[in-house]
Image: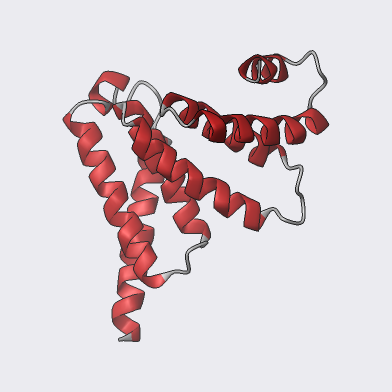
């Protein structure tokens, strides 16, 4: 049983490594945005979902490999225009970051992910949740950036 779980873990890591390799290709050799949103986009999301399922079967719910795959899956869903699914993955990424960065509660990465979560929530009609995410994001990002920063200006515009 342990060997079977180890094999699944290695398969999941191999899939994640393949995805890393694809995303690191230079722009001249990587697929264009239009091809990502076509059938190859479906193939990418299927591959990422498969990796996610395999990793979930052998890892804890907050394993760093799951975080990496969820981030890539969120991006693939965004490119495919599947905002509700991207929002679901974004919420999982935020959960991971909250737990992983609890010793650094004002980490800019968390603030940026919260901003993304707010944008996706707003797009999905979850306006109350979006406002909560924007406020939390502003609280964090105002530590890292001054008030004139374009990011904070845009964030403040979202709260008006």
* Residue 104 horizontal/vertical position (percent): 77, 50
Visual colour scheme: secondary structure
Q: Residue at x 29, y 28 (%)?
A: 80
Q: Residue at x 34, y 34 (%)?
A: 77
Query: Quick check: 152 left or right of 93?
Result: right
Relative height, residue 13 to residue 73 (above, below): below
Residue 41: quadrant of the picture: top left
Query: Quick check: 135 left or right of 95?
Result: right
Q: Residue furthest front?
A: 128
Which of the two residues, 154 or 69, is positioned nearer the viewer here? 154
Residue 52: quadrant of the picture: bottom left
Query: Quick check: 35 left or right of 60?
Result: left
Relative height, residue 11 to residue 29 (above, below): below
Query: Quick check: 116 left or right of 160?
Result: left
* Residue 76 horizontal/vertical position (percent): 35, 35
| Count of marks placed on residues | 0
Q: Residue at x 55, y 36 (%)?
A: 129
Q: Residue furthest bottom?
A: 1
Q: Residue at x 64, y 57 (%)?
A: 99
Is residue 41 in sight in this rendering?
Answer: yes
* Residue 144 horizontal/vertical position (percent): 79, 31
Q: Residue furthest left?
A: 39
Which of the two residues, 32 or 76, is positioned nearer the viewer here? 76
Quadrant for the C terminus in the image: top right
Quadrant for the N terminus in the image: bottom left
* Residue 117 horizontal/vertical position (percent): 53, 35
Is residue 76 in sight in this rendering?
Answer: no
């Amino acid at each position: 049983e342990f060997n079977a779980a180890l094999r699944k873990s290695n398969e999941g890591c191999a899939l994640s490594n393949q995805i890393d390799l694809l995303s690191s290709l230079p722009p001249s050799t990587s697929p264009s945005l239009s091809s990502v949103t076509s059938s190859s986009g479906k193939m990418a999301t299927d591959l990422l979902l498969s990796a996610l399922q395999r990793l979930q079967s052998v890892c804890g719910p907050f394993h760093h490999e799951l975080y990496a795959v969820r981030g890539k899956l969120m991006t693939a869903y965004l490119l495919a225009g599947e905002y509700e699914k991207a929002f679901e993955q974004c919420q999982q990424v935020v959960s991971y970051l909250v737990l992983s960065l609890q010793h650094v509660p004002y980490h800019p990465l968390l603030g940026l992910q919260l901003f993304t979560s707010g944008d996706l929530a707003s797009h999905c009609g979850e306006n109350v949740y979006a406002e909560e995410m924007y406020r939390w994001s502003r609280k964090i990002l105002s530590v890292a950036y001054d008030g004139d920063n374009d990011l904070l200006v845009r964030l403040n515009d979202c709260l008006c």
